[in-house]
Structure formats: structure tokens, C-alpha cells
Image (spheres, rainbow, N blue to C red):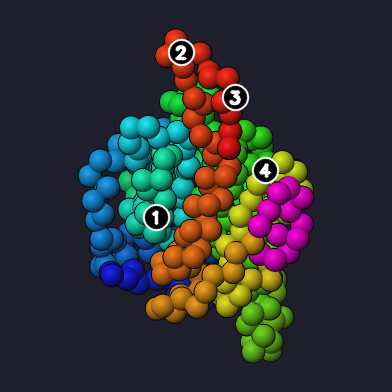
Amino acid sequence: MTHIKSPAIGLGISLLLVLIVGGCSSDVMLHPGIARLMEASNPTPRIAERDRAKAICVRNEQGNMLEGLLLAQEGDYGTVIVSDGNATSRERTLYYFRFLLGNGFRVLVFSFQGFDANEGKAHLSSLIGDARAFYAYARQAFPGEPIAYAAHSLSTAAALCLASRQAELAGVVLQGAFDPKGVAYAKLAQLWYLFPLYPLLAPYAIFVSWTVPDELAVKECVANLQNTPALFVHHPQDTVTPYRGAIELYEAYPGPKSFVIPKEPHPPNYHMNYTSDETAQEETLRFIRRVLPKAPAIQQDGAPALGAGTR
């Protein structure tokens, strides 16, 4: 099997570097340049399903054109919108989540403003609106059908805050979840051996946290999710998005929820658990099948069959 090299080590120290030289939260958390560099130096393997993907173009709330990839086949019911982290191309996102394909529902993969060939500059203020644009497309293209959101890393913030504003989301998958407003402090706590530099680093951490848009205040978004099922997937040794923060979000989550701890990854990459953990993949598919109901049974005259409903 071909393994994708991860930017986890570089991203894990990116906060420290930006704290030292200065920069706002979007500079810390969004790296479209790294995504492009990875595609150029280590192209994503092309899967067979990619050839039947349909390009979907939408405009976000800033008026920028964004492109997604819709993978569907006859008989699919329901849609899972999918997005990834802060240094990931759309093609790499598709490859990472390829285990979702061919399971009776559509998969709509997208990347954020400023990534790939998408218009605009990458900025945290666009994340929820970007996700909302693809959500709106799915609602219009497939009226009456359920929609779920599978997110990795930074995208989990967009998923949770979109869900808090869209009761129609059938469920959210959160792999490597964290709160952008608190991650700077969590990173400083991880770098305990730099304690002598805390007087220098702490003000920058405060600044980075302060510049995260209020609409991405994940802990506040979570408080509104009494009815949206959520699946958290997080490895205790993940240093890119600290495990403690995911546990705190899980404990605060008021709606139906479950937590999957992935097995030891091979090769070691505690932030990208779907790469080698078939159990985590199976648990995720089981969750999605549960929250996306089957299509109602249809009689020959077009009326719903008696007793038809969700499983």
C-alpha cells in the first residue's frame, strides 16, 4: 500500500514558529502553500473512483468560487460532505477518506477558500461559509435527503459550528477535533520544556487566540448540539491536535455521541488515523450508516410503501 507522507511534524511546530515571529490565527492554522508543495513533491495516488468524480462549483459568502468533487453511483441515498485539515489538498482529502466510497451514499469532497485552485485568500473567517455553500448545494441537488459531515483536524471546527447552525445535519464525524480558540494555549502546554520563554510566547498565544473569529468558538457551538449525533475519533498520542482538548469537547457535547480511540498506527502517525486503522474506518462507516437512513421504499404507483421508514 502507498503511504502518504504527513506534514504532522512540521505543522506541530508551526504554532511555535509563528508565535516567535508573529502572525494572526489564519497564518498559524491555514497552510495552502504546504498543501500545494506536498502535491508537487509527493502527488496523491489516483484512485479508480476519481475518474467518475463530478466537479461541483459553488460560490461562498465572500463571492469566491470553490470546487468540490462529487462521487456518486446509481441508488445512492444521502450525502456526506467531507473536508480535511489546514495543509491538505482536495485530492489528498479524497484519498484519505476513500474508505467512504461505494457504501450507498454520495461523498462530496471540498477544500476551503484559497486552497487548490479555489478563489480568495485562505482565512479562518471563510471556513463555515465554505462548508455551508457545499451543504446548500447538496440540499438543492438532492432535496429531502439527509446530509452528514465527516471532518478531519481543523475542519472539525467548521463541522461543529455549521451543525450548531443547521439542525438538518444528520450527524458529524470528528477526527482530530480541537477548539481553534484554545489550541495556542494547548500547544504552549505541550512545549513545557520552553517554560523559560513563556513570558515571550504567552502574549503571542493570547493574540493568536484573540484573532480566531468568534463564529469558530467551538465550545459555544457544541453547547447548541443537543440533537446532532457525533462520532469523535482521536488518538491519545496525537500532538498535532491535543487529545485532552478532544476529551473536553466530547465531555461537553450534549447530544448523542461516541468516542473511538484508534489503534497504534503503522507507520506512526497519530493524527491521521484512517490511513492504516481499518477498525476506525469500520466504526466511522457504521456511524454514518446509522445516521443516514435508507431511502423510503416506493410502491409502483410512486407512493411510499406502508411501514417504510428509517432503519
Residue 109, position as x, y percentages in the image: 40, 45
Residue 223, position as x, y percentages in the image: 77, 48
Q: Which mark is residue 307?
A: 3
Name the residue beneath numbered marker 1.
99
In three-dimensional space, the C-alpha distance between marks 1 and 3, rounded to whole angstroms, equals 32 Å
Identity, as a three-letter code, of the amino acid under mark 2: Gly
In three-dimensional space, the C-alpha distance between marks 4 and 3, rounded to whole angstroms, equals 25 Å
What residue is rendered at 73% in x and 48% in y?
255
Q: Earlier in the sequence, mark 1 or mark 4?
A: 1
Q: Secondary structure at mark 4?
A: loop
In the rendered structure, which segment of residues is drawn in magenta? 246-258
Q: Secondary structure at mark 3?
A: loop
Say if residue 198 shows up in the picture: yes
Q: Residue furthest top?
A: 301
Which callout, 4 or 3, points to the residue nearer the camera? 3
Position of the C terminus, as image quadrant, is top right
Is residue 306 toward the left or the right of residue 256 in the image? left
In three-dimensional space, the C-alpha distance between marks 4 and 2, rounded to whole angstroms, equals 31 Å
Q: Secondary structure at mark 1?
A: helix
Towards the viewer: 126 or 236: 236
Name the residue beneath numbered marker 4.
228
